[in-house]
Image (spheres, helix red, strand yellow):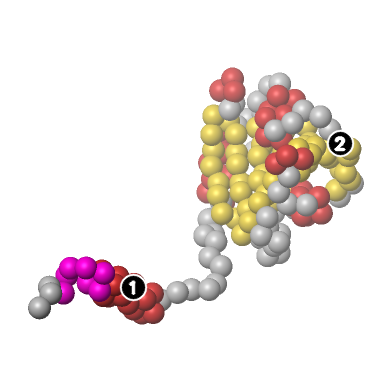
Amino acid sequence: MRRFTQGFYGYAVALFVCLAGAGLFLLVTPQSREEHIPRLEYSITVANFGHTVPYGVWAPQKDPAGWIPNSNRIAKGQNGAQVLYLGYATAKREHAMFAQSDEKPAAGFASRMANIERTVGTQQVGGVTWEQRFREDKKQRSLVRVLPETTLVITGTADWPELAELAALLQQRPKG
């Protein structure tokens, strides 16, 4: 009598046992069909940023409807300037990021955040003019606003109306 582990039939039985085991594992493993984007609170990061800069910090007064804040951090920019980053998954599940810094020159910071120097137009948001930049190969849109004390950049794969929605909710918090 042939050994069961030899030859083609032994290989076929072993393959069947492995596939049956993998199928059983997939059958009993819980699977979620729901989207899960981690929500990260950013109020402490914004407050800490406010303690490190000599001006009133800009931040959303609330999150846009359906948006999920999913990242935030403070980093060192060029020339030792502090940079605040707040990242979001938008209601359309695109990416948007708000960044601000007092880095000089402001044009250099804005170009680095937007990944392009060239402007494509302007956009009015709440009576305020924002500069539009678009990098086609990355599908990256950016709104840039240069103020005397700080530069604000909203950038990402979100469309112009979504970026404007975040820009409309920005409010300067008093220093202190």
The image shows residue 113, relative to residue 164, as above or below, that is: above
Residue type marked 1:
Leu
Residue type marked 2:
Val
The image shows residue 110, relative to residue 88, as above or below, that is: above
Please give left or right for residue 111 compared with residue 26 in the image. right
Any part of residue 25 in sight: no
Q: Say which label, 1 or 2, has the lower sequence index.
A: 1
The image shows residue 105, relative to residue 82, as above or below, that is: above
Rendering coords of residue 1 (x, y %) = 10, 78
Q: Which mark is nearer the camera, 1 or 2?
A: 1
The residue lying at 77 percent from left, 28 percent from top is 117
Span highlighted in magenta in the image: 4-10
Within-10-Å neighbours for mark 2: few <14, some 14–19, many 20+: few
- Judged from the image, the secondary structure of the residue bearing numbered disc 2 is loop
Location of residue 114 by image quarter: top right
- Judged from the image, the secondary structure of the residue bearing numbered disc 1 is helix
- Quadrant of the image for the C terminus? top right
Please give left or right for residue 114 compared with residue 82 in the image. right
Q: Pointer 1: what residue?
A: 19
Rendering coords of residue 3 (x, y %) = 12, 73
Q: Is residue 29 magenta?
A: no
